[in-house]
Image (cartoon, helix red, strand yellow):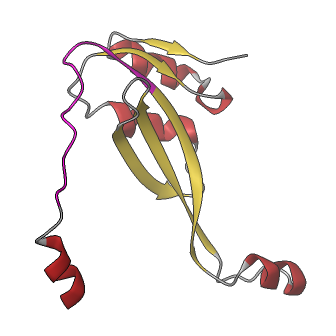
Amino acid sequence: YSCLCKRSKTLNVQYRKTASKGFIDIVVDSTGLKVYGNGEWHTRKHRATKRRTWRKLHLAVDATSHDIVGAELSMVNVSDGEALVDLIRPLRRNIDRVTGDGAYDTRSCYEEVAAKDAIMRVPP
């Protein structure tokens, strides 16, 4: 800790300014995170244990600037479509399009995106 504290005084960190105030395109997706449990090799060799715990990290990313504009951590049993509401509802920026994979191809996702006056795009 003391080395980091001393070094931080000499670092010259430049922060990026936020993107323009116009409309943004958002890309949404999720990934799994292992919170607790043995390694993958141990699990494959000795079968899965009950102590293995996973979480899902849902992200909303600005397609132009690649900034993360929304993040939500959920249990593994929450679908991507259910988490979309918590990702885009609190955003204050104007959204033009939301792009996601087939997991977001649900009626509730289209309704939530339409409530933000945006277009939902899901590739075939």
63, above or below 5, in the image:
above
Instruction: Report the magenta residues as a range.
Output: 12-26
Is 74 placed left or right of 87 in the picture? right
Residue at far left of view? 9
* Extreme-right residue of the structure: 45
Q: Nearer the viewer, residue 81 or 43?
A: 43
Whether residue 50 appears in this view of the structure is yes
Name the image quarter holding residue 34: bottom right
- Is 47 magenta? The answer is no
Residue sitting at 29 percent across and 13 percent down? 23
In the picture, the quarter occupied by the N terminus is: bottom left
Q: Is residue 20 magenta?
A: yes
Q: Is residue 87 left or right of residue 8?
A: right
Residue in front for this viewpoint, 87 or 14: 14
Q: Residue at x 58, y 51 (%)?
A: 31
Q: Position of residue 103 (x, y in %)?
A: 64, 33
- Front residue of 32/82: it is 32
Residue 102 rendering spot, x and y as whole percentages: 67, 27
User: Residue 42's spot in the image, x, y percent?
Assistant: 79, 85
Determine whether, in the image, residue 12 is placed left or right of residue 85: left
Location of residue 117 (image quadrant): top left
Q: Is residue 1 visible?
A: no
Camera-nearest residue between 74 and 122? 122
